[in-house]
Amino acid sequence: MTDPVSLPVLLVVEDDEGLQRQLRWAYEGYKVVSALNRAEALELLRLHEPAVVTLDLGLPPDPDGTTEGFAALTEILRLKPDTKVIVASGHGARESALHAIALGAYDFYAKPVDIDQLGLIVARAFHLHALEAENHRLEAQASDGGTVLGTLITAAPSMLKVARTIERVAPADVSVMLLGASGTGKELLARAVHEKSRRASGPFVAINCAAIPENLLEAELFGFERGAFTGAVKTTPGKIEMASGGTLFLDEIGDVPLPLQVKLLRFLQERTIERIGGRQTIPVDLRIVCATHQDLDTMQADGRFREDLYYRLAEMVVAIPSLAERPGDAVLLARHFTRRFARELNVPVTGLAPDAVDAVDSYGWPGNVRELENRIKRAVIMAEGKLVGALDLDLPGLSEEAFDAINLRAAREKADRRAIHQALVRTEHNISGAAKLLGISRPTLYDLLKQYQLHS
């Protein structure tokens, strides 16, 4: 039986005691507390801090009107703005609904009450409240340098789902396949699997199968004995052997050639290897995490990837969303990278200008997090002031002329900078002369120099 203390709290504000009892018994899975009037509702709000409130607008001393109900709505949202308030009224339903939503209510339903319909609205409200609470928590963590999974910065529901999956999968010693486009953070997630597993004290060994020529990949994976081939001057263990006791991360597994796929499959079945040129059987105990951006289903159908190998590697499959599918994360990551690179590069940049935030949020980021990281690093280096501007990002399709046309503030700042610079050059940095040339007073020019961080 579920402990009532751990249940999410639903506050029912209803002056009809019969309906109040009906609503209390209708909601399973919630701790229901009830109030008959505004004063009781506010007292219970402070005591229980409910995530969701159902509020009858017709409360005493105005049971036939809505003034008391709207007053209660206003007070509830003032005390606890994140509460999802669902209001009900039989008095001028349409007008009341519009006014309630305008005041900040989550939803509205008309009386007489349909318990099933109201139950769905309440369930959605609890779900949304939980998502928002988690996102706020993660945003707060990220702004303080905190993360999920130790290294992952996100507040997007799609990526939070991935993080929760990784947390559940990591302790189970199964092979994990990460599917996602380039730049989505597959190696970061592979490290998270390792660090949250029972093998965390062992080595984490990564190899990019696409970055090594086909004729060298086997030697990299399995190692070789001295004299096995020209240039093999000493016995060298391979990545598989080096990862024993820990985790082997095979990035871009879709690029492994078919002959080597056969040898990988044999290793996964027997958990032993032989180095190239060697005859000794070496037992290896490790966990495999692999990743690819390729469509392995199509590759299997085309005969380019072995089906039996796929099922050995894909005991658990985790699909990673692109940055474009993670609303809000681009800005969150951009701010993190800006702080990081400003610190690493020792430059006086303190953050992103509003136009840069807009540009980051509206751009599609086809190169995902890797592209964003590179853009921010370059922008931090190129920024003239303390804030990275949209033009510093040098995003495709965001030309200087196009940006000036859509952002008046940026256009004005650019024009001011150009005019001030020209005036200072013409007057050999004489402030009085430059101010006269610009048609402004000296104090105004000093203010502009300070605002734009320009040197006189």
Image (cartoon, grey):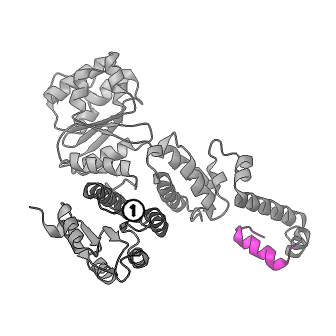
Rendered-image quadrant of the N terminus: bottom left
Which residue is depicted at the point 44% across and 64% down? 97
Which residue is depicted at the point 73% across and 52% down? 404
**Does residue 193 appear left or right of residue 455 in this picture?**
left
Report which quarter residue 356 is drawn in: bottom right
Q: Nearer the viewer, residue 184 or 245?
A: 184
Q: Is residue 140 positioned above or below 177 on the image?
A: below
Does the rendering let one see residue 331? yes
x and y percent of residue 238 in the render? 27, 32
Does the rendering let one see residue 277? no
* Residue 396 included in the magenta stretch of the image: no
Q: Amino acid at mark 1?
A: Phe
Which element carries disc 1, helix, strand or loop? strand
Magenta-drawn segment: 440-456
Report which quarter residue 17 is drawn in: bottom left
x and y percent of residue 70 in the render? 43, 75
Residue labelled with disc 1: 108
**Does residue 241 appear left or right of residue 352 in this picture?**
left
Rendered-image quadrant of the C terminus: bottom right
